[in-house]
Every structure is written in C-alpha cells, then in structure tokens.
Amino acid sequence: MFSFLRPRGSAVPASTKIELDGEPVSVSVRVSKRSRSFRLSLPAAGPLLTLPEGARWSEAEAFLQRHRHWLAARLPRTAQAQRLEAGSSVPLRGVPHRVAALGSLRGRVERGEVSGSPVLLVPGDTAHQPRRLYDWLKAEALVDLERQSHWHAGRLGVEVKQIRLRSQSSRWGSCSSSGTINYNWRLILAPPHVLDYVAAHEVAHLVEMNHSPAFWATVERTLPDMERGRAWLKAHGRGLMAWQAPGKEGA
C-alpha cells in the first residue's frame, strides 16, 4: 500500500515523506536554478526530489506520487538507520567492530578484541556512550583526512587552509576557493582507499573548481587508482550514510 504524507503549507520544504509498503521514507527536496523539470534520483544519502526554480510544491507532490512505484522498486530495503550504540557493528576503516561498554564512566574509546573479533570499548553510562563514540570517530576521521588532504595538496602544489567535519546528508565533501574543505565524518567508516579518494577529489577542486575533464585528470594525477574509491562509494555509499549522529534523524 502506498500513501503520501503532505507537509503543511505550500512553501517548498527541505524534505518530505512518502509511505512505501507501509513504511515512511524520507525524501530530500532541492530547488535548482538549472533544472527545467522535476527529477527524482537516488544519491548515496537517499531519495532526492529536485524542483525547477519557481515550481509549485503541489505539482512536485503530484510528480512524486506518480513515481512512487519507481522509487519503491529501486530503494534498498537494507539502508535503514544505523545508530552508534552498544551491540551495533560499526565498520571502522571498513572493518566491522562490535560496540561494547568499557565498564567505566571515565576514559576514552579503546580498540580491542573479544574472542578474536575487533571491538570498540566505549566508556560512560548507556545514555552517553553514543556521543562518546561519535566524538571519537570524528577525531579519528580528522586525523586521517588532514594527513591525506595535505599529502595530495603537496602533490598538486596547492594549500589547504582549513579542514572541518560535517554531518552532510548528501555529500562526502565540499571545497571552497578560500582553501577550506568540509568532509563527512562517516568517511572514517569506509576503507582507507575510499577516504583517500574523497580527499584527492576535494583537494583537486583547489586546482579546478568544477567537474570538467580537466578536474578528473587532476584527481587522477594525484591518485592514479581513483576509480577504485569512486566505484566503492557508488556501490556502498548509501549504506554508510545510514549511520546517524547521536540525536539526529537522517543526519
């Protein structure tokens, strides 16, 4: 059974929901000056409805309703929200680690093994453990991303001024002409070659602020096997985006 959940008002919302087989599915909404028609797509972060600038929201709703069967057929049923909590299996640098309580209120996250399997031991009480683990994962991500970003910057002869972590729902990174790069914290969950690809991609934007053939040649110049990481993200990125920051829904 399909039903449509309409947001209040006629203004274009940032997201909407549609029920597919009785389950509510969030659909991000974006207005594009370059779009000439409505478009429904499935990027790594999940369903995205793109509207032409000036389009009526009621028409966008009707378009989404007409294409609900297309969406239902293609939406992975396995990309459900994943939370950083005890008992979950978190893919640290691509290797699954079971999350368990450290058994003390103070301390820092520790890596270890239980019965030969990798674990992440998280301190604090149950309510605070997700935040402790999230903060630790971000710190680990920052170390890896700073190292790889500066390495690629040296190869391309550019300078990275600042690196920040974000919890974007549809991007792995973004780069400004001033030299600031924003990265998605979830990259620490991917295999190292994937994080390396995103770092090379964003640093290459300091040479070419576009996605022209010259840009892709620049990425390949600093990372000859760039297609390996790019292909992995296309195949598995949506699963990584399912991991939620504590206190966020679909962050």
Image (cartoon, helix red, strand yellow):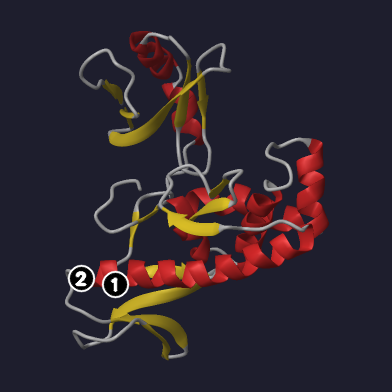
Classify 10 Å Cα crowding around label 1: few (below 14), some (14-19), many (20 and above).
many
Amino acid on which disc 2 is placed: His
**Spot occupied by residue 88 in the image (x, y as percentages of width and height):** 34, 68
- Is 122 in front, or is 87? 122
* Residue name at image x 49 percent, y 65 percent: 189
* Residue name at image x 29 percent, y 72 percent: 132
Above or below, comparing residue 72 to residue 218 in the picture? above
**Spot occupied by residue 160 in the image (x, y as percentages of width and height):** 62, 58
Mark pair 1, 2: CA separation: 6 Å
Q: Is residue 92 visible?
A: no
Q: Quadrant of the N terminus?
A: top left
Q: Is residue 221 visible?
A: yes
SS at circle 1: helix
Above or below, comparing residue 80 to residue 116 in the picture? above
The answer to whether marks 1 and 2 mark residues whose Cβ atoms lie closer than 8 Å is yes
Q: Which residue is mark 1?
A: 132
* Residue name at image x 49 percent, y 32 percent: 73
Q: Which quadrant of the structure image shows residue 82?
A: bottom left
Looking at the image, residue 88 sits to the left or right of residue 229; the answer is left
Image label count: 2
Above or below, comparing residue 15 to residue 228 in the picture? above
Looking at the image, residue 188 sits to the left or right of residue 244; the answer is right
- Is 140 in front, or is 15? 140
Q: Which residue is mark 2?
A: 128
**Spot occupied by residue 221 in the image (x, y as percentages of width and height):** 82, 55
Above or below, comparing residue 120 to residue 19 in the picture? below
SS at circle 2: loop
Looking at the image, residue 189 sits to the left or right of residue 215; the answer is left
Amino acid on which disc 1 is placed: Arg
**Spot occupied by residue 133 in the image (x, y as percentages of width and height):** 33, 71
